[in-house]
């Protein structure tokens, strides 16, 4: 993509001013359409040192109302090291109707790693590209327009600009040894950039020749305008997707009978033993800079809360967070549905425990028909990709389905209604959900079948007997952590 | 507070278990009351190394539903260095009805600084204590219950615990040289702790003797229960505060006539000049690790948007963010009103530009009677304290009141209504606000008089002529930054 670039392309002052007037007017109108049509827009600006990222972004945002855009510049190393690397970028993806401009993007980390002379193994590189492409595809599937610019510059012009920056005391700090290294090893870097661009071109890059700054600005603005106009046109021509055929029912994976139990004596003894073990494993997690995600899903009244409590009893309270997941807020709804979860992922050494999770997409949202069929069907793949990304970044993932039978649920509902301290736990909604038991069973089966991955396996926990269920979860966590750490 | 502590206090196993059963039951009930009465609860747990912060917090949260609390452990140095130090703590303050437990608190920074042998100058120390006491008072005034524990330990017991931790390979990493230094210089540290506790005792500390762990746990839980019960009782006895007498009208501070103007030629020339200057000052800001807060307030249609645009035209888009401030969301309403602003404060080297701001409290909220009189009256002091905190942390603060007269506003409203690209900018609300011009004038005058501080002065900008107003703002920013940097 980068070779044989014609860096001579230029625009004289008159042409430039005429074009800019025209494009600026279009942009101010377009931003209102973006807002009105609730399109989220993601702009990536990557490129060589001194290719003018700052200046060109300034030109792009200049006609825009600051209420409708934000510029994100996430410094690698600041957050990237402690959480899976896509997390901070996910957090900055725009609400519907807004524009997020990434001055440093998710493509950066691979360049950073490679240019530090530590050549990434092919396998890791492939994982990286898969994650990046999946991320961009997911945003696009959710209605976002993703516009990617790579600012290219010739070796000679880059050298001139570094010299110019260095000659001014106010700007000399902007040039460092790494920049000069990039200029000196220009051909090597170009190869690296080219490889990255080639492998992440599913959502296509626009290469911008920046030797002539006027030409570059106009190319960026006109490409942006064209891509947005294109997306708006597509959106208005879009026909509602046909719902796919209902999926076949499978047999519910169940390791044990729902009524497996344990004696009180054995419970007390094993519980204390596992809790001590998990406490020490928590320390080890910290030392080894790994982190843990635990997903709790299950029937209403299956005992998630009490189970979580036993799991965390002896853990250092500074090392874990329990995240109760309810219906999304207005703000969360205006983002991709995975957005809110990425913000809650654990940093190194920590546990994030989800009391319900992203699986709501293929459970309650499916059964209650809150989400169109083709959208929740897409979610299985999105979820698998997200979990794969976490796992590839060292997160150890547990997913528990707390399984009780219909009679046991009824018993518990009734008991909650009579206990004044538990009344708050039972609502009309619980009774409504119960009526749809069969629909839920279908959804659960499909979920277990489609998202049971080696790096993120489901454990179905027989939970009619709460004590058995608690030990089962603790045992699973302890055994896996012992082998992983 | 720390001297002459009796470390012998203890509880035997039976007493302990009896007390704990009782306290745990009380806590599970209390958390529901906290939620129901919408009380925000802040718990601080500070103390010596190895005094058992983790263990004791674990005991406190054990009876609680994880949906109602979170444990915050903000590592100093991570975020503290780049933003005013209270920012990350403000961000973690609880919503009404929730409990935030701070395992590392805002008191920590002074201990950190002092124990690094760099004795804080008395003046800086005083500023620090003022900020901390103001923060806690503000939370309390907003209805929060603030419970502060200091975990005390004897020199001998601390030494024993360090040795025990070191003897286990799973925990030895938890003891480092600094810990041993603390033990070795126990008396010196005690003096430092004592001073800090004494100076921040407006909201009183509870000293917890931790040599006997059972005794400590019971003391923490019972103090917590008592303080919450006390607050609930107070709340139900509280009579609505009498509204204070309406404040007298003052003369509007106005440096120039609202109609000051500038020739087109002079405008063009000066604008370009200032924009170049501010661009370079932006670089300097970065080098000197300072940051800038700019507040725009003004009459509707005073030209805030266009003014901001000229200010940011040549700034590096990665160095500033424009924050449009509208009515608070549901989530924001469930926090102290300053909460959302603290989250938006600039990191070193950056600008945060507020398009409307925290002054809404004493403008729209006062005039529209959205907030009780005694609450917005309290806000002048709260705002001054917040800005003083920012200034003391190196933030350069600008506050602009964009001032137009009634006729000019009418002209602009009418022109917006006929321009299809500006129609979105004018709403019914604007017309309603206009009817209350006199009430707003009163509120503005009082605001300017009460919050015009040396470190955060107001500049009233004559804005009937937009070009004049833009130059005035740019000039003010450029001149002040030139003298500050």
Image (cartoon, coloured by chain):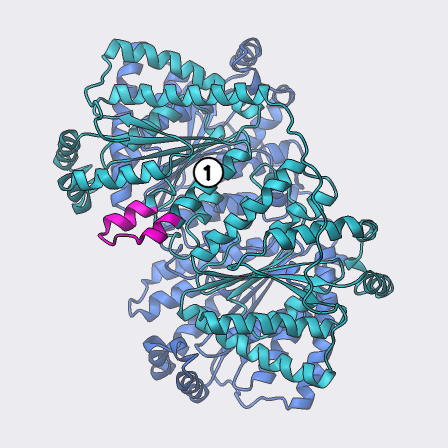
Chain colours: A blue, B cyan
Q: Quadrant of the N terminus of chain B?
A: top left
Instruction: State the residue in front, B178 or A80.
Output: B178
Along the line of sight, which residue is nearer the eye, A395 or B451? B451
- Residue A316 part of the magenta segment: no
**Secondary structure mostly taken by the magenta-highlighted segment of the chain:** helix
Residue B425 in the figure: left or right of residue B215 = right
Tell me: residue A57, above or below residue B390. below
**Residue with the mark numbered 1:** B136
Task: Judge from the rendering whether residue B198 lies leftward or rightward of residue A199; answer left or right.
Answer: left
Taking the spot 74% from the left edge, 69% from the top edge, the residue there is B257
Quadrant location, the C terminus of chain B: bottom left
Q: How many marks?
A: 1
Is residue A41 positioned above or below B92 on the image? below
Does the image show residue A28? yes
Q: Secondary structure at mark 1?
A: helix
Q: Position of residue A339 (x, y in %)?
A: 54, 47
When asked about the image quadrant of residue A169, the answer is bottom left
Tell me residue B414's x, y (percent).
87, 62
Residue range (magenta): B109-126
User: Where does the image place residue B75, in percent across and percent down from the top left?
Assistant: 35, 46
Q: Give the answer, above or below, for where B32 lies relative to B360.
A: above
Residue at image position (42%, 45%) is B130
Tell whether B373 sits left or right of A103.
Answer: right
Q: Can residue A263 be seen at all in this image of the molecule?
A: no
Indicate the quadrant where residue A179 lies. bottom left
Q: Is residue A27 left or right of residue B101?
A: right
């Amino acid at each position: 993509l980068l070779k044989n670039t014609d860096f001579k392309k230029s625009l004289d002052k008159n042409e430039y001013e005429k074009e800019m007037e025209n494009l600026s007017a279009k942009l101010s109108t377009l931003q209102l359409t973006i807002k009105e049509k609730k399109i989220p827009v993601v702009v990536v600006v990557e490129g060589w040192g001194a290719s003018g990222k700052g200046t060109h972004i300034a030109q792009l945002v200049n006609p825009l109302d600051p209420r409708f855009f934000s510029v994100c510049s996430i410094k690698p190393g600041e957050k990237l090291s402690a959480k899976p690397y896509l997390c901070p970028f996910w957090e900055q993806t725009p609400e519907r109707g807004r524009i997020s401009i990434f001055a440093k993007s998710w493509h950066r980390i691979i360049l950073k790693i490679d240019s530090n002379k530590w050549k990434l193994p092919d396998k890791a590189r492939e994982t990286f590209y898969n994650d990046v492409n999946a991320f961009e595809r997911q945003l696009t599937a959710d209605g976002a327009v993703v516009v990617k610019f790579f600012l290219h510059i010739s070796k000679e012009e880059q050298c001139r600009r570094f010299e110019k920056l260095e000659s001014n005391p106010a700007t000399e700090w902007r040039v460092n040894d790494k920049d000069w290294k990039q200029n000196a090893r220009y051909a090597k870097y170009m190869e690296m950039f080219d490889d990255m661009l080639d492998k992440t071109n599913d959502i296509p890059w626009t290469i911008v020749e920046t030797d002539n700054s006027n030409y570059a600005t106009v190319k960026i603005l006109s490409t942006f305008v064209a891509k947005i106009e294109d997306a708006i046109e597509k959106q208005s021509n879009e026909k509602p997707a046909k719902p796919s055929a209902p999926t076949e029912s499978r047999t519910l994976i169940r390791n044990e009978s729902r009524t497996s139990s344990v004696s009180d004596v054995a419970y007390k003894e094993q519980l204390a033993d596992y809790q001590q073990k998990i406490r020490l494993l928590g320390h080890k997690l910290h030392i080894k800079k790994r982190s843990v995600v635990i997903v709790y899903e299950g029937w209403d009244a299956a005992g998630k809360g009490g189970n979580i409590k036993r799991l965390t009893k002896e853990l250092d309270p500074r090392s874990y967070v329990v995240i109760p997941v309810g219906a999304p807020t207005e703000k969360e709804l205006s983002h991709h549905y995975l957005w809110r979860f990425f913000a809650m992922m654990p940093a190194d050494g920590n546990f994030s425990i989800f009391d319900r999770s992203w699986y709501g997409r293929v459970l309650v949202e499916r059964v209650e028909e809150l989400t169109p069929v083709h959208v929740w069907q897409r979610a299985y793949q999105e979820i698998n990709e997200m979990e794969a990304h976490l796992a590839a970044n060292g997160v150890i993932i547990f997913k528990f389905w707390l399984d009780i039978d219909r009679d046991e649920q009824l018993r518990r509902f009734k008991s909650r209604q009579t206990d004044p301290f538990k009344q708050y736990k039972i609502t009309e909604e619980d009774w409504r959900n119960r009526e749809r038991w069969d629909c839920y069973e279908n959804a659960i089966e499909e979920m277990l079948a489609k998202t049971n991955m080696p790096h993120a396996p489901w454990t179905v926990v027989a939970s009619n007997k709460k004590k058995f269920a608690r030990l089962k979860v603790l045992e699973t966590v302890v055994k896996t952590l012992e082998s992983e750490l």
